[in-house]
């Protein structure tokens, strides 16, 4: 069994750089739907710790809750961490608070851990160096 697995978007990729011991399946700019479509069938989500970072790139046409529930249902781990998006691009037409509520609800139902992004770059989405360090420190337990 893998010790650690990080899945998701560019935030997941940045986090994986600080946790090189973790296997990662991530790609910049992926919505939850695109991640599931691209990786789900070929990616076993089995590890002692699984870190999920999705939602920042979900747009009006993505059924975020459905996509994240499918992902969580196929995840086997001692601990699952959800990186809570801090923001998204206004062009996506989705209030980030809606995505945050979905993630919090799924995490609570599964007794998972939510890791908010508290320090961001000017875009309000991407963690800054301190933000990434704080997240990376939290997932090594």
Image: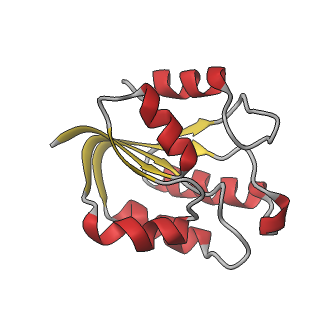
Say left or right for 43 vs 51: left
Location of residue 79 in the rendering, given as x and y in whole percent from the top left corner: 35, 40
Classify 55 as above or below 78: below
Q: Specify the farthest residue to the left.
A: 1
Q: Nearer the viewer, residue 114 or 39?
A: 39
- Asked which quadrant contains residue 112, the reply is top left
Residue 74 image position (x, y, % from top left): 32, 64
Above or below residue 5? Residue 137 is: above
- The residue drawn where x is 41% and y is 69% is 38
Residue at point 41%, 64% (across, down): 71
Of residues 141 and 111, the one drawn nearer to the viewer in this rendering = 141
Instruction: Answer with left or right where residue 123 lies relative to residue 73.
Output: right
Q: What residue is drawn where x is 45% and y is 26%?
A: 18
Image quarter of the C terminus: top left
Measured along the vertical axis of the image, is residue 67 above or below residue 102? Answer: below
What residue appears at the point 84 percent right and 60 percent down from the top-left corner?
A: 90
């Amino acid at each position: 069994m893998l010790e650690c697995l990080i899945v998701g978007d560019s935030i997941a990729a940045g986090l994986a750089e600080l946790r090189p011991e973790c296997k990662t399946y991530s790609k910049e700019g992926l919505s939850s739907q695109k991640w599931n479509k691209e990786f789900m069938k070929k990616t076993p989500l089995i590890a002692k710790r699984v870190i999920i970072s999705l939602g920042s790139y979900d747009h009006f046409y993505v059924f975020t809750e459905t996509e994240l529930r499918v992902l969580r249902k196929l995840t086997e781990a001692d601990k699952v961490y959800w990186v809570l998006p801090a923001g998204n691009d206004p062009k996506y037409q989705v209030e980030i608070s809606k995505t945050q509520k979905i993630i919090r609800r799924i995490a609570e139902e599964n007794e998972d851990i939510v890791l908010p992004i508290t320090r961001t770059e000017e875009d309000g989405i991407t963690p800054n160096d301190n933000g990434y360090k704080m997240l990376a420190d939290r997932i090594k337990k």
